[in-house]
Every structure is written in structure tokens, then in C-alpha cells.
Image (tube, grey):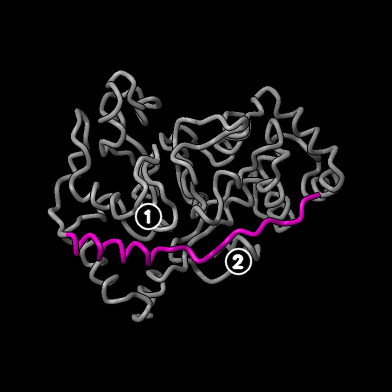
Amino acid sequence: MLVAVAFLLVAAPSPLGAMKIPDDNPQAPEKIALGEQLWFDKRLSVDGTRACYSCHQNEDGLGGHDPLAIGPGEKKLTRHSPVMWNVGFLPRWYWDGRATTLEGQTKAAWGGSNMGVGNDNLEAKAKTIEAIEGYKTQFAKVFPDGVTAANVVKALVAYERTLVCDNTAYDRFVAGEKKALSKQAQSGLALFTGKAGCTGCHPAPFFSAAYEAPEGMYYNAGVGTDVTPEDKVDVGRMSVTKKESDWAAFKVPSLRNVAKSAPYFHDGSVAKLEDAVRFMAAGGRKNKNVSELLVDKKLSAAEVKDLVAFLKSLDCPGVLKAPKLP
């Protein structure tokens, strides 16, 4: 288990299995500590107003606070900020899966609209980081070539890979602590794996099929297709594959910490968990490409509440603490 706060690199086996760490960016305590500082440092953005943490805060379950992410200059972006727990286990990143490495995703977020620096200006921004008292010394201890844009990204990702959620009430229940789940949550678990059919898209242990497939997993649930003209709908995965079968399909999000990470879906259009559950259990929203897996499960109001009770058992107990910055 990798722990965000304690920086443990080896511990008890995790129910999530082993995380794949690339050979060119191995984990190391000093690198993780450096990445943690950078992750909370607004000076990394183009105008000093946004840090990585700005879009992934504790009070929002490490997901987005606003329906759509907000960039520098209070610019509203196009999609909702996803939850960061277990981000290191994914095979593809972004709602449409366009990033094939976590390093690539982090660089794109830094250079793109999230942090606003611009891909052509990343090395210049790295130089401004180098000029901050303390950072130059820390980088020299971790990277032989000092402060470069590539090394900023490697440090950030090393920290991101410590954001592991694997000790929820559900995990403790499965491990034998039968009192970890209330009777209502246990009823919800039975529905989740049975009548409600949630495991088709949200199987344990990650509670998302996106973690299990090399290319990720993407489905059209009809989100956002009712209020936007068809030619202006966010096409999601289709923007990557160019396949009509991927029109308006998006990555299946993990349900770990879902009760804490409202609002929901790629456009942040649903404010309450119970409403999101009701929407999915009713078969999503019909459109020309809605997934055949989505059908009306005809759940009662009581069954929806039981499902929500179970989903709350997936709350992640960890919190992030801002370190002292140089």
C-alpha cells in the first residue's frame, strides 16, 4: 500500500494489487516530498493563481468542486475535474483516455488550460521554479540535471502515485470485519452486485472497468446529450479514436470516494449522489449511441437509498495536508 501522507514505499499487500511504476520514474521519498510541494504550489501556474490541488481538494473528495473545472483567470474549462484517488493504477487518463501515461497527462495539464503555462513555456516556467530559494537544492538531491520541465513532471507524478485509497469500510468488510458495513449498506452491496447490475461497469476492487482494460473503458450514458444540439455535443472518446461507436462515450469513473466527490459525470451536471444513482439505474438517457448495458433496473426509492448507503462505504479515509513551501 502506498500512503500519501507517510510516503511509505513498501507495506502490507493492497487489495488493489501492485501499481506499475515506469523504469524512468522510480519512486523515492525525496522525489515524492518534492512532488507534494509542487502539487500545492500555485507558482507553478501561468499567473500564480492555481495549483494542482485547486481542482482536487479534500472537501471535494479530491475531485472538482465546480461542475466544470476552472483554470487561471477564472476561465471555465470543458469538463469536470475527476477524483485523484488511485490515479496511478489507470491505464489511460482524461475522460476520453487520450493520455497514455500519467506523466503525459500531468505535463498536458501543466502546459494546457488547467495551469495555463503553455507547452512552449514549460522550460521557462521551470527556470522560475529553480529561482525560488529551496527548490534548486531539493531538485539537485533528486535529479542529476536539476530543475527541468521533465523533472517537475516526474516529481509531481511520483506524488500522485501515492494517492491510494484501499482501506475503505468496504475493504475492511471484505477482509472479514463484518461490522464495517451497516445492514443497509450490506443490502446495497447485494443490490450493487445483483439486481442493479452495477458491477458490469464498476467491478471491485477499483469499482471501474476502466482500470481493467489496456485502453480503458468508455460508455455513452446519455449525459449531456439532452440539452445540447447533436453537432455540439462533447463527443468524448470519439475525439481520440474517430470511431462513431465512441460518440459521446466517456471513461467509467471509479466509485471510490464517490459520496464525497459531488457533482457527478464528465460535465458535473448532477449535484446529488442519489440523483446520479437514480439516473444510472433508470438506464441513463436515450440517444443514438447509449450503451446497451444501460437498462431500467426498476429500483424502488428504498433500493436507491440502500445503494447510496453502500456507496458511502467506499469513502476514502485519507486526506492531503499542504506542506511548507520553499
Front label number (2 vs 1): 1
Tag count: 2
In percent of width and height, residue 74 lies at 58, 32
- Indicate the quadrant containing the N terminus: top left, top right, bottom left or bottom right: bottom right
Q: Label 2 crowding class (10 Å Cα cut-off): few <14, some 14-19, many 20+?
A: few
Q: Residue drawn at (85%, 48%), measured in percent from left and top? A: 134
In the rendered image, is residue 145 in sight? no
Residue reaching furthest top? 231
Q: Residue drawn at (55%, 29%), measured in percent from left and top? A: 75
Nearer to the camera, 238 or 28: 238
Q: Identity of the amino acid at label 2?
A: Val
Nearer to the camera, 226 or 10: 226
Q: Identity of the amino acid at label 1?
A: Leu
In percent of width and height, residue 246 lies at 30, 30
Quick check: is 303 in the magenta stretch? yes
Quick check: is 286 in the magenta stretch? no
Q: Which residues are magenta?
A: 301-326
Q: Label 1 crowding class (10 Å Cα cut-off): few <14, some 14-19, many 20+?
A: some
Figure quadrant of residue 284: top left
In percent of width and height, residue 3 lies at 59, 63
Q: Give the answer, above or below, for where 261 lies relative to 97.
A: below
Figure quadrant of residue 287: top left
In percent of width and height, residue 79 lies at 44, 35
Which of the numbered marks, if any, corresponds to residue 11?
none
Which of the numbered marks, if any, corresponds to residue 255?
1
Mark 2, residue position? 10
Q: Give the answer, above or below, for where 154 lies relative to 182.
A: above
Mark 2 residue element: loop
Upstream in sequence: badge 2 or badge 1: 2
Question: Left or right: where does residue 92 sit relative to residue 326?
Answer: left
Figure quadrant of residue 187: bottom left
> CA gap, disc 2 to disc 1?
26 Å
